[in-house]
Image: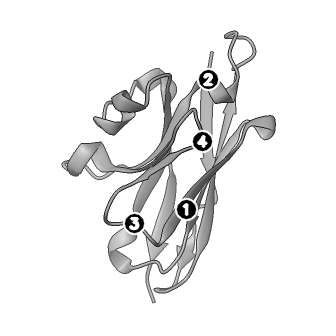
Amino acid sequence: QVQLVESGGALVQPGGSLRLSCAVSGLTTAGFSLDDYAIGWFRQTPGLERGGLLSITNRDGSAYYADSVKGRFTISRDNAKNTVYLHMASLKPEDTDVYFCAADHYENVLFAGEVTEDYRGQGTQVTVSS
């Protein structure tokens, strides 16, 4: 069974930075590797555009960013470590939320904000406050 576990959330002051990690396990058992999946980072607050989608790292290494984080957040992946990162800079109080990662074989599924419950993590809390 594929599992995704987020870490790195914290309390940070406005203008600060954080790096979130999404560790993916169970891929080999499922017969896949991380480069068989697109991985997306989402915010958990209900009602957001595209289900809270912030960024996607696609299977071909390209990336998508929502307008709200473009220029501030950077997504990266280390396929050898089965880990995807979200580097967050210039954080604002409105970035406060639970952040989670999700996986799918198809980028367009994540782009539509569709997340399969068995292929998402529980989330990590990011709080931006002075």
Q: Earlier in the sequence, mark 3 or mark 1?
A: 3
Q: Residue at x 63, y 64 (%)?
A: 19
Q: Nearer the viewer, mark 3 or mark 4?
A: 4
Q: Residue at x 49, y 86 (%)?
A: 15
Q: Residue at x 42, y 25 (%)?
A: 117
Instruction: Report whether residue 9 is seen.
Output: yes
Q: Nearer the viewer, residue 25 or 109?
A: 109
Residue at the disc numbered 2: 36
Residue at the disc numbered 4: 61
Q: Earlier in the sequence, mark 1 or mark 4?
A: 4
Residue 60 sits above or below residue 94 on the image: above
Residue 74's tag is 1
Q: Nearer the viewer, mark 1 or mark 4?
A: 4
Q: Position of residue 12 (x, y in %)?
A: 54, 79
User: 10 Å neighbourhood of mark 2: few (<14), some, or many (≥20)?
Assistant: some
Give the spatial CA distance, label 3 vs label 4.
19 Å
Going by the numbered disc 3, the residue's amino acid type is Val
Q: Quadrant of the N terminus?
A: top right
Q: Is residue 112 left or right of residue 8?
A: left
Q: Position of residue 25 (x, y in %)?
A: 70, 28
Residue at the disc numbered 3: 69
Going by the numbered disc 1, the residue's amino acid type is Thr
Going by the numbered disc 2, the residue's amino acid type is Asp
User: 10 Å neighbourhood of mark 4: few (<14), some, or many (≥20)?
Assistant: few
Give the spatial CA distance, label 2 vs label 1.
20 Å
Instruction: Report whether residue 122 is seen.
Output: no
Residue 86 sits above or below residue 16 on the image: above
